[in-house]
Structure formats: C-alpha cells, structure tokens
Amino acid sequence: MTVIVRFAPSPTGKLHVGNVRAALWNWLFARKEGGRFILRIDDTDRERSTRAYEEGIKRDLEWLGLFWDETFRQSERFGEYDAVAEILRKRGLLYPCYETPEELERKRRLQRARGLPPVYDRAALQYTDEQISAFEREGRRPHWRFRLSQKPVSWNDLIRGETTVDTASVSDPVLVREDGVYLYTLPSCIDDVDMGITHVIRGEDHVTNAAVQIEIMQAVIEARGKGAVPAFAHHSLLVGADGQGLSKRLGALSIEAMREDGLEPAAITSLLARLGTADPVTPERDLMALAAGFDFARLGRAPARFDPADLDALNAKILHAAPYEAVADRLAAFGVSKPVWEAVKGNIARLSEAARWRDIVEGEIDPVIEDETLTREAAGLVPDDPLDGASWDDFVARVQERTGAKGKKLFMPLRLALTGEARGPEMAQLFPLIGAEKARARLSGRRA
C-alpha cells in the first residue's frame, strides 16, 4: 500500500504554527514511508476564501520546504459532491430540515434546562407532506443533515490507541446549508475516498468528528462502489508557554510573520517536528533526516507547549553553525561578504543582523569614547594594514604595556570606540575587517 496523506487548509486566513504542525507531520510521515503528500485547498466557503490566502499558504509551505506531490481545489469538484449528495438523499441518509437557527437554539436551551445533551432530536424525520408544504409556502429552504447510525464507532487511532465514540451522543451533522453551500464534512469525506487517502493526521479536536466522518465515508464508499476508510492519528494541540491556548496570538505566530521577522525555516520545522514527542529538540536543516526519525509511537498525548523563546534559541544555533555557502544567496541581498559572515555569525539570532555588523565594520559609525586618554594612546599603536587574526592580541598587549590598563578597563573602551557597541563578535575577527585607517580614526574619536 502506498501511503497517501493530505493537508487541507482553508484559504480564509494565514498559515500559523498550529496548522503547519499538522502539515509537517503529514509530510514527514509520507516521506518516511515513500508515499505521497497532497495539498487540498478547502475553498467551499466561497465568500471567505480568496486566492490571495491560497497563494500565501503555498508560499509558506514552499518556504518551509514542504513541497506537495499533487494539489487541487474543492471548488473544482462540486459536480462530484452533487452526485454523491443525490445518492445519499435517495437512500434517506441525507434528509431535509426546516428549523430556523432560532428554533434550533430554543430546542438546545430546553434540553440543557432538562439536563439533557443538546443533540438534535430528528424532528425533521417526522415531517408530514403538509408540514413540508407549509414550510415552503413560508419561504423556508431546507438544510440537509446526515442520518447517523446512533451506534458506537471504533477505530485504532495511531496516537490515541483504541478509540470509541457513540454517534448517539452527537447531532446528525448538517452537510448542506439552506443556500446549497456544502459544509466542510461531506466534500472532505468524498475527497478522502476519491483520492485514496490512507492516513488522516490532524489535531485531537477532531476526534469526535472522526466517528461522524467514518460513517459518512462508509456511505460514500457504498455510493461510489469503491474506496476505503483511512487510518486516523489525532495528535495533541499546541498551547502557549503559559499553558493557555494560542488562538488570540495566531497573527504573531503566522508563518508569514515569522519569515518577515527573519526566522530560519529550519528553526520552525526543527521545533514543530519534535514538539510534543519524546525526542529532544535539536536544530536540523535536513527535512529528510527529520522524516527518518518520525514515529507515531514517539508522540505524546499531553498538550505541547510552544514557546517563541525556544524558536529564537534554535534559530541562533542554526545560524551559528551555518557555513557561508548555505546562506550566501540571502546574504547577498544584505551585501554581507563571507569574511563578515564568518566573523559575526556566532553572535546573531537573525540573518538580517549580519547587515548591521557589515555597516559597523565597513561603513561609518560615531565612536563611543569612554576613556579618551586610553583610546587616543591606542590610536597611535594600531599596526599597519594588512591586519590578520593575530593583530588584535598584539595590539591589545601594546596598549596594556603603554597605559597599564587591564581587564574590562582595557577591553571595553577599545570595543566601544571601534564598534560603538558594548557587546558583539570577537574583536580579533572584527579588527582586520575594520582596518587600520578606520581603527585609528575611531580611536581618535572621529566618525569613520
């Protein structure tokens, strides 16, 4: 059996860490098993779906390295959905309901008041022809519900283990709205059957939905005369570092925002691949290496805590270890040369920060003079170009011998004058890049 998985975002918003984690785990599993990863665009909500969001989702996935083997839009398959819906209507599995939203809410309130679960009472199945005619004369149009078996549905969840949901505990789901628009469930079930999806990997908030969808898929398979119900794996959800939900912070946690903030895609995939597993989170640029280690047995059941500070730390580790060749194309946009990169990479958390250090060593700065006597003395001790890796230690030794300054009182005034910064990369590496002429000018207090 060829493993076939799908990631099915709705193009009604931006991709964020919560849903990209599901995309990543689907991709990793497919690649480990030599299978296929399908990108399905769930755009049946034509009012809210936009091509701009769709393109943004694709751009984010490509940036992360999650390339798909096939993609399609649900909006291109309405004919398929219509055909199956008609069969389900004829078999009595899809039945019309005429209650208004207000009437349904009133029923739910009464059920709660009586201590009963707010499950739809299937009153529509008892409509007489006269009642239906009366509703239609009022101008009411029906919404369509799927008739569940009201029996337990069990499956062996690849993460949760043996799972059972009694469909008598849930309402018959609305599959088609009054205006004829399909809700998520029916198109999704038809697509999963038609595309031969073998595994559905998604958040645990869909566990109850799985029982409903298994029954709908079985009906679709009977209508189609072929297909199979996929295996399910419901993973834990992400929470913030404080244990609270991420819903109010998703704007800041969009993949687009992270890209614009200068995060490396490998930092995001390295963290999300291991978050919620028994494995340590380590930086990994190679997605196939992450795929090789993917294992449902390693996935935990507890909510996984997402802390942006962990992402920042991973990002810094990835950059600190990155050879120039791995980032050369992007550094070129900042005008950062290989010597500058090698000098500063150990002290930056974002690639864009390399540009600031390029400006410091190659451009002009206003030196910070903390000890004018020491720095003016030091200006006369700067060796001639070309400076090299040993020049800094020789220079500092001469300044110490001439002035008697030691430790922080020696190093800090020199660093401030030469870079304008109290912290940063090793001066032994920056000194040759600054060069003798700029060094003398800066130590003398001149802008250079």
Image: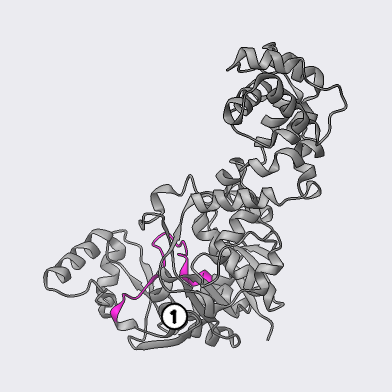
Check the image and report above or below for 140 versus 202.
Answer: above
Q: Nearer the viewer, residue 4 or 129?
A: 4
Does residue 67 appear to the left or right of 168 in the view shown? right
Does residue 397 appear to the left or right of 350 in the view shown? right
Q: Residue at x 26, y 67 (%)?
A: 134
Give the quarter of the image for residue 165.
Answer: bottom left
- On the question of residue 51 being in view, the answer is yes
Q: Which residue is mark 1?
A: 160
Amino acid type at mark 1: Arg
How many residues crowd mark 1 within 10 Å: few (<14), some (14–19), many (20+)? many
Report if residue 305 lies within the magenta region: no
Q: Nearer the viewer, residue 244 or 411?
A: 411
Give the quarter of the image for residue 384.
Answer: top right
Residue 196 is situated, as x and y percent measured from the top left of the image, at 63, 79
- On the question of residue 366 being in view, the answer is no
Magenta range? 169-188
Residue 36 is situated, as x and y percent measured from the top left of the image, at 69, 73
Check the image and report above or below for 367 versus 341.
Answer: above
Q: Residue at x 71, y 52 (%)?
A: 321
Q: Residue at x 17, y 65 (%)?
A: 109
Residue 353 is situated, as x and y percent measured from the top left of the image, at 65, 36
Give the quarter of the image for residue 377.
Answer: top right
Residue 229 is situated, as x and y percent measured from the top left of the image, at 54, 84
Which quadrant: the N terminus? bottom right
